[in-house]
Amino acid sequence: MKRGFSLALILLLVASIILGCSNSSSSGSKDVVKVWTYPVHGDYEPELQELIKSFEAENENIKIEYEVLSWAEGPQKFDIALNSGNPPDIYFGKPQGKYVDSGLAVDLTGKLNVNESDYNDVALDHMRIEGGLYGLPIYMFLHVWGGNKQLMEQYGIDYEKIQTEGWTWAEFKELAAKGVTTKASGEQQYGFVFQGNNEELLDHLALNNGLPYRFNEDGITWNDDKILETMQYIRSLIDDGIMPRETAAVDPAKRMELYYNHQALFFGRAIPYFDPVVEAHNEEIKEGKVEGEEVNFVLLPIPHNEGQEQVSFGGSEGYMLFTQKNAKEDHVNNSIKVLEHLTSAEAGQSAAALALPQVHKDAEGKFEMPLAPYNEVAAEVLASKVLPPAKVSAAAKAKDDRFRTEVVIPTFQGILSGEVTPEEALETFKTKGTEIFAK
């Protein structure tokens, strides 16, 4: 039954895609440009409608039709459209090797009407693959760590110093240990909680232990003492009681439950947008809609190992251009104009709404950031420490995707659960990583 349902769903998606995309080149006397996007933030659709309105007012020969996809089903719908040769003209996300391999992703190099210098260099680099520019960014995302302001103040932790100067692994561990206690309610309070359903904690700390990239053209870089040291450090946080012993079973919802319940001094993974989200939760407490005690979010950097550079985990997302079979050159050029408008300074509201720094230089300072004053400087510092992407081929990226899915995630979850030692994990990375990258 499940296989039949899945096949029926796919057939319906294919039918809707063909009907929705095959006639995208014209509607009456106007050229129709189709945009597929996502609910980037809570108020993104009204913002998108305003962008469309302002564009169509200046380009009467072009009509924009958009669809807001769900985060759950949208990627599958797009992949089906791409594989059928009828993707939308413009799609929200970040470039992937499979998009380039399809031959339908359009390299924007030399085709833009705007200057690339209008955008943040690192953000723009994250929209490139093998030297080709396959999109323009609307924001640079940041994965950060967070803190409970009330608990940090209770333990005398100078969070402003940490925000500006960073902290080492040893400093973090010493401070996190202060938060380990049993509450009056009998509930356990932890120094640090992190979701255990993927490998992100390992990514964050490896990045800050001299391993800025998991792989290069020669293969994996997670095959030496630095990644072993990183895994040993994570395991020590669990063994010392700073992290829950059941971390492997902690999902994002449980992580936030522990944070809201004042059972976590520090937590990850967070994003700057958690600041307004947590404040909205506080308002619900004040209004009696939910029970609980108010908490304030402190934006914190990922700690770095002694002697290593502090690095932020981030990248960029925006709009990419695709072409259909037999698409006319005029239609492609019109689609480029639409893409440029959707990523222009006027589109800077998205970055601001997500509490992220602007990537379009003309948008800097034009939109209010929904951040508490004590988090504003931290956001700027963190954004300045995002590295450009690794300069590798699409084939190498595809191998890394397989290495991450088949090897890194299950092996790391074994470390979190105590079923695999860091030493055993290193050997697995070496043997299976070499096998995957050798093909």
Image (cartoon, rainbow, N blue to C red):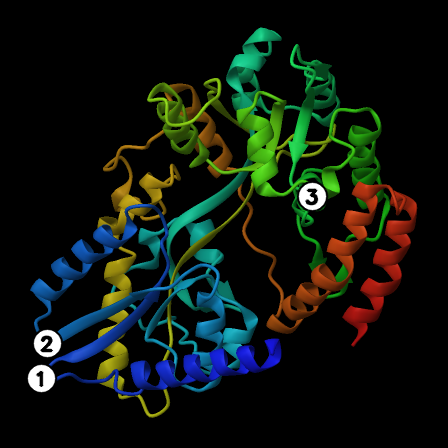
Q: Is residue 163 left or right of residue 53?
A: right
- Please state which of residues 388 and 237 is positioned toward the viewer in this rendering: 237
Q: Mark on residue 196?
A: 3
Outermost residue, front direction? Answer: 1
The percent position of residue 86, horizontal first and vertical second, equals 38, 84
Q: Is residue 238 left or right of residue 139?
A: right
- The amino acid beneath tag 3 is Gly
CA–CA distance in space, label 2 to label 1: 7 Å
Q: Looking at the image, which residue is at 25% across and 37% down?
A: 367
Position of the C terminus, as image quadrant, is bottom right
- Residue 210 visible in this rendered orientation of the protein: no
| Residue at disc 3, secondary structure | loop
CA–CA distance in space, label 3 to label 1: 54 Å
Q: Is residue 30 left or right of residue 109?
A: left
| Residue at disc 1, secondary structure | loop
- The amino acid beneath tag 1 is Ser
CA–CA distance in space, label 2 to label 3: 51 Å
Residue, disc 2: 61
Residue, disc 1: 29
